[in-house]
Amino acid sequence: MHHCHEALQSVEWDTLLFIAALFVMIEGLGELGLWRVIAQSLSDMVALAPVGSRQYLAIGLIMWGSAILSAFVDNVPFTATMVP
């Protein structure tokens, strides 16, 4: 029992609660439809490009969009959001 108490004291509860709250926030934004709006906007931009360059544009948009969004959102919930 003594080892469990020491282990629980060494846990960074603030960090765990912060990450849990980020997951809740990401899910809430998903329920509001924000991710659907962003995805539809990106899809519309790709559809406007010439057929031969759509793949490159889509890759660029996903890469740059991911880089910008991950600057504001922690990487763990962001990755959970981006995985289909």
Image (cartoon, rainbow, N blue to C red):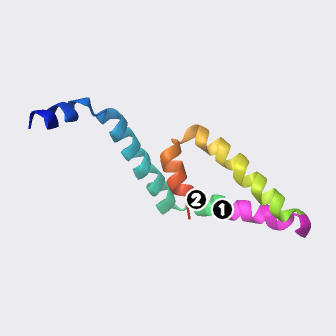
Q: Position of residue 63 (x, y in %)?
A: 71, 49
- The residue drawn where x is 21% and y is 30% is 9
| Residue 62, placed above or below residue 53 | above
Query: Could you tell me which quadrant the N terminus lies in?
Result: top left
Task: Identify the residue under disc 2.
Answer: 35
Q: Which mark is residue 1?
A: none
Distance from disc 2 to disc 1, alpha carbons, whole Å, reads: 6 Å
Q: Position of residue 35 (x, y in %)?
A: 58, 59
* Left or right position of 10 against 28: left
| Residue 75, placed above or below residue 15 | below
| Residue 76, placed above or below residue 1 | below
Q: Which mark is residue 39?
A: 1
Q: Crowding at label 2, few (<14), some or many (≥20) Cα neighbours within 10 Å? A: some
- The residue drawn where x is 62% and y is 44% is 69
**Amino acid type for the residue under numbered disc 1:** Ala
Judge by depth and name the residue closer to the eye, 32 or 39: 39
The residues colored magenta run 39-52
Judge by depth and name the residue closer to the eye, 35 or 61: 61
Res 43 seen here = yes
**Amino acid type for the residue under numbered disc 2:** Trp
- The residue drawn where x is 73% and y is 65% is 43
Res 50 seen here = no
Q: Is residue 46 magenta?
A: yes
Query: Could you tell me which quadrant the C terminus lies in?
Result: bottom right
Dominant secondary structure (helix, strand or loop) of the stretch shown in magenta: helix
Quarter of the image for residue 36 reads: bottom right
In contact (CB < 8 Å): disc 2 and disc 1: yes
* Left or right position of 57 against 17: right
Q: Secondary structure at mark 2?
A: helix
Q: Position of residue 79 (x, y in %)?
A: 54, 51
Q: Secondary structure at mark 1?
A: helix
